[in-house]
Image: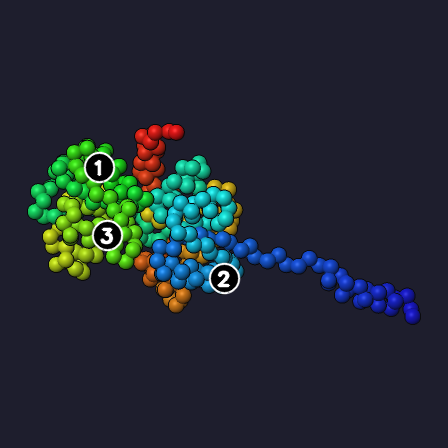
Amino acid sequence: MPHRQFALLAVLLLLPAMAVAQPAEKPARVLRLGGVAYSPDAVSVWKGIRVYLARHNLPIEFVLYSNYDGLIDGLRDGHVDIAWNSPLAHARFHLRQGDSQVLAMRDVDRGFRSKLIVHKDAGISTLADLQGKTLILGSRDSAEATVLPTYYFKKQGVDFGKLRVLSLHDEVDERGTPCCSENHILTALQKGRGQAGIVSEVLWKRLTSERPTEVSQFREIWTSPAFSHCVFTARKDFDRKIGARFAELMLAMDGKDAVTAEILRLEQCQKWVPGTHEGFEDLLQALREQHKQTPQK
């Protein structure tokens, strides 16, 4: 066999071995996302997000916790990479870790406000008139229904020693559901358990527009400053390129696709928007002041 042909044959024989020796393509990193199982809808939302992100080569697994304390512990310990947090959970995590990344939010999570509504015949026109009355609040873990209203009221001179606070934190309704939401506050008001209560601006506007007769016995007397609500949180050292890719895909959701349309519907929003630390300043300060007032062991 001529020398040139022998050399060519040797190369051809080596090609399969060279092909085998090539390193395999690195699989896409599987993100671990965490949330709280607040209702059966939570599972549907996360399944939809998982399908949607997989289409765009961002595979995820999701972990659902029973409460936000467990979720932020999981985020801190690296059991999840990104957490879908309540505002209070995000603020607590941010303070404990010294910083955080805010990746994405719903459009309804920006400029969120709480309202104080009162019985029309309760003789309450200003915050000062709460003296001697019963104020109904939601869960102690709720930024909008307890933590921020309490913080703002104190800043405006309300003396909590001169009124009664009815917290629904430890109560359950007839279905065994914790009485933590604004709907439970409204029910307690309707049952005459207090003269004043906190609900969100979103709920109040919807009720006055769609069910005016139901809320005709109430009127609003105070609206909170705007603050931010739920948010996707990541640790401060989380890979920023992956975080940016995740946020980019969340922001690209629209109602044209059946999967994303259902996610948006269940999350009661029109779109996702960029996450920002703006809007959490008052909540962070409220938690700092709580910490100062809590006796240290």
Q: Is residue 72 left or right of residue 201?
A: right
Q: Secondary structure at mark 3?
A: helix
Amino acid found under the numbered disc labelled 2 = Ala
CA gap between label 1 and label 2 equals: 46 Å
* Residue 205 drawn at (x, y percent): 20, 54
Q: Quadrant of the N terminus?
A: bottom right
Q: How is the image coloured?
A: rainbow
Amino acid found under the numbered disc labelled 1 = Phe
Tell me the residue at 40%/65% (across/down). 259
For the residue carrying disc 2, how many other residues have a C-alpha within 10 Å: few (<14), some (14-19), or many (20+)?
few
Q: Pick whichever, 187 or 121, lies toward us.
A: 187
CA gap between label 2 and label 3 equals: 38 Å
Q: Which mark is residue 184?
A: 3
Q: Pick whichever, 147 or 100, lies toward us.
A: 147
CA gap between label 1 and label 3 equals: 21 Å
Dividing the picture into quarters, in which one does residue 285 lie?
Answer: top left
Q: Quadrant of the C terminus?
A: top left
Q: Earlier in the sequence, mark 1 or mark 2?
A: 2
Looking at the rendered image, the disc whose residue lies closer to the viewer, 1 or 2, is: 1
Q: Is residue 149 left or right of residue 162?
A: right
Tell me the residue at 34%/36% (across/down). 287
Which residue corresponds to mark 2? Answer: 54
Residue 285 seen in the figure:
no
Amino acid found under the numbered disc labelled 3 = His
Which residue corresponds to mark 1? Answer: 153
Q: How many marks?
A: 3
Q: Earlier in the sequence, mark 1 or mark 3?
A: 1
In the rendered image, the residue lying farthest to the right is: 1
